[in-house]
Image (cartoon, helix red, strand yellow):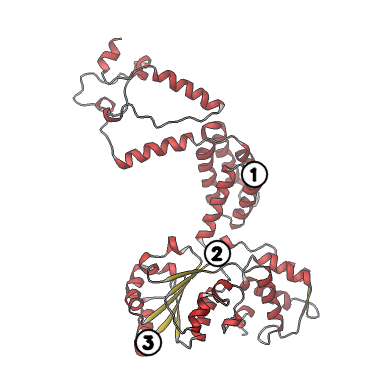
Amino acid sequence: MREPLAFRLKPEHLEDIIGQKHLVGKDGIIRKCIENNSLFSMIFFGPPGVGKTSLAKVIANEMHLPYREFNATVGNKKDLDAIFLEAKLSGSLVLICDEVHRLNKDKQDLLLPHVENGSIILIGATTANPYHSINPAIRSRCHLFELYPLDHDDIKEAILKALKNPKGLNDEYAIDEDAIDKIVDTVNGDIRFALNILEIAALSSKDKHISKESVLEYCKFANNRSFGSDDGHYNLLSAFQKSIRGSDVNAALYYLALLAQSGDLESIIRRLLVIAYEDIGLANPQLCARTISACDAAEHVGFPEAIIPLGTHIIDLCLAPKSRTGADSAHRAQALVNEKTYEMPAYLHLTPVGVKVKYDYDNYDDFHKIQYLPDAIKDIEFVSFNHNKYEEMLKHNYEELKKTKRSNDLGKIYKK
């Protein structure tokens, strides 16, 4: 069986690398390493299909160094032991590790001494953010280099090379300019995805002519890079919430559409509930309740129709007045208890022991006179109101209540 087009066209030399000029260009660090015949452990990170593993192999080939590949997700200790033995026999070995952020502690413990003494030169590849996902012990022994999504001209160059390359389509196919543009627009900087579309469009073409229609037949949706890693998905969720907080309704709907492609309704609903209470909150309490209703409706219908109640409600959230009074007040209380806790008044216990006067459940008129905070912080205030109609009413009630001095002397309160 013939290998896929993207596999056949994997770069072998530095000049075959498309894009990433900041690394392989005239003054790029990778080019300098090769020219100076000096290599160190490094980690390449970036979205799928930008050439992380390919660049690692090119480095080893250009420097005439033996290398072995290891996938941190499926590789085991036995595989690593064989690699370490080979490194010992050869003196030094390049280890190209895909999904390097998936290395568990046992594998790291095996690998670290060999990276430390230089018998293994590690070149890791990951779609995750290494500053968050890679163990500090590994990260501190490697230089980190980001690979960027390829731009329009880069993808177009890759397509034209694939059409002419003897290992590729060998100049046997013609392609329309709008077909190239469609592939470029669809793949979102992923060169592997572009070559996969080109290959299937070529196989299905009539008279070896690739048209926009043949591309559209096998490419219904644009590539969503957020599916490639947890980071991408969480970045989308972050952009989604920030857009609603910033009242940019068009941006919020755009990020909703991207999130909907993943089908992860649970994450969208969880984020919307947080947004409603964190960012709108007391500026429009009824909207918090409507958020629950909208999320229930979305769960009942599921995707693809779920985007209708969600989109409708997101417009409401975006254009509603905003208030973080609730969230900020709760966080102030949380910050205090994280630092220190205090003993509550004994009369607030469920079953008070050793108190002279117990809490009177029937004395409704005096509830607002009782001190509920511990003595050491009895005058602390966590809440700070914003200026909107609902909170102005709450603030008025709050100020009125403050006029009554609270006491921990229940006997004195109840005698009145």
Q: Is 115 drawn above or below residue 260 in the view shown?
A: below
Instruction: State the mark number for residue 86.
Output: 3
Residue carrying label 2: 228
Identify which residue is drawn at 25% across, 15% down.
411
- Split into 4 quadrants, where in the image is the N terminus? bottom right
Q: Position of residue 225 (x, y in %)?
A: 59, 63
Give left or right: position of 108 versus 291. Answer: left
CA gap, disc 2 to disc 1? 26 Å
Q: Is 259 drawn above or below residue 20 in the view shown?
A: above
Identified by mark 2, the residue type is Gly
> Quick one: 48 or 40, which is closer to the camera?
40
Q: Position of residue 263 (x, y in %)?
A: 58, 55
Q: Earlier in the sequence, mark 2 or mark 1?
A: 2
CA gap, disc 1 to disc 3? 58 Å
Q: Earlier in the sequence, mark 1 or mark 3?
A: 3
Identified by mark 1, the residue type is Val
Q: Quadrant of residue 54?
A: bottom right
Of the two numbered discs 2 and 1 in the rendering, the one whose residue sits closer to the viewer: 1
Give the farthest residue toward the front: 27
Give left or right: position of 119 versus 4. Answer: left
Give the farthest residue toward the right: 207
Q: Position of residue 404 (x, y in %)?
A: 37, 16
Residue carrying label 1: 249
Q: Could you say whether the residue bearing mark 3 is in a helix, strand or loop?
A: helix
- Residue 303 appears in the rendering: no
> Quick one: 409 or 270, which is closer to the camera?
409
Identified by mark 3, the residue type is Glu
Identify which residue is drawn at 53% across, 42% down.
275
Within 10 Å of disc 3 (Cα), the crowding (few <14, some 14-19, many 20+) is: some
